[in-house]
Amino acid sequence: MSTIKIHDKEFTPYITDQEIQEKIQLLAQQLKKDYGNKKPLFLSILNGSFLFTADLFKYLDFEAEVCFVKLASYKGVSSTGNVITAIGLDTNLNDRHVIILEDIIDTGKTLHHFLPQLQSQQLASLKIAVLLNKKEALAYPIKVDYDCFEIPNKFVVGYGLDYDGLGRNSKDIYQLKED
Ligand code: XMP
Ligand code: MG
């Protein structure tokens, strides 16, 4: 793997496809222990989580459902976000064990603004699973229940994550190169 350029910025190889797949398989095993007989509903937050969700779902060998919602909140390389309302949340969540799937948690602002929208329904349980956890950037009271990787507070792209629209179609994850 070598450095890549997206728009005006250079990115260096950070997490390989193989490492990602291994961690997602471990997550799938853990979820089976915790939800194997609960028929959980995975709520995937678009756009960034589409590859994570697709790969995780293929590794789940127990009954589970998935649905997708979109809450766009992100422009450029810093998490500024005015969180936009969830689009596509038309599934009945009453009495369901719900697991939110996010590509990355940064400040936690996105989920902090989204979670109250679930409160009108009586979920059986709610947990959060993320591929990447930028733990030191967390600024809102969000508890991440499952993560595949803890990463430092540096911008990353690839495997569903974008820099201004580009870079999602990389199997590997890249980190913004320091100047
Ligand atoms: P918050 O701060 O709300 O951010 O937890 C979560 C959302 O911000 C985006 N995000 C990133 N996207 N590389 C990206 O491509 C990053 O390093 C990054 N950090 C945050 C992402 O959309 C996530 O859902
Ligand atoms: Mg996202």
Image (spheres, grey):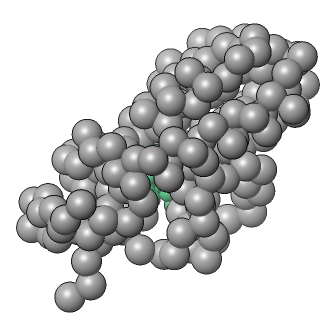
For the point 43% across and 31% down, which residue is it?
50
Is residue 174 at least partly visible in the picture? yes
Is residue 110 at least partly visible in the picture? no
In the displayed structure, 37 sits above or below 160; it is above
For the point 67% across and 22% down, which residue is it?
60
For the N terminus, give its image quadrant.
Answer: bottom left
In the displayed structure, 13 sits above or below 143; it is below
For the C terminus, give its image quadrant.
Answer: bottom left
- Ligand 1, seen in the image, is in the quarter at bottom left
Q: Nearer the viewer, residue 170 or 98?
A: 170
For the point 60% across and 12% down, which residue is it?
90
In the displayed structure, 137 sits above or below 54; it is below
Horizontal relation, residue 50 to residue 25: left or right: left
- Residue 140, percent from left and from top: 67, 65
Horizontal relation, residue 166 to residue 8: left or right: right
Horizontal relation, residue 29 to residue 52: left or right: right
Q: Quadrant of residue 3?
A: bottom left
- Residue 7, percent from left and from top: 10, 60
- Residue 72, percent from left and from top: 41, 41
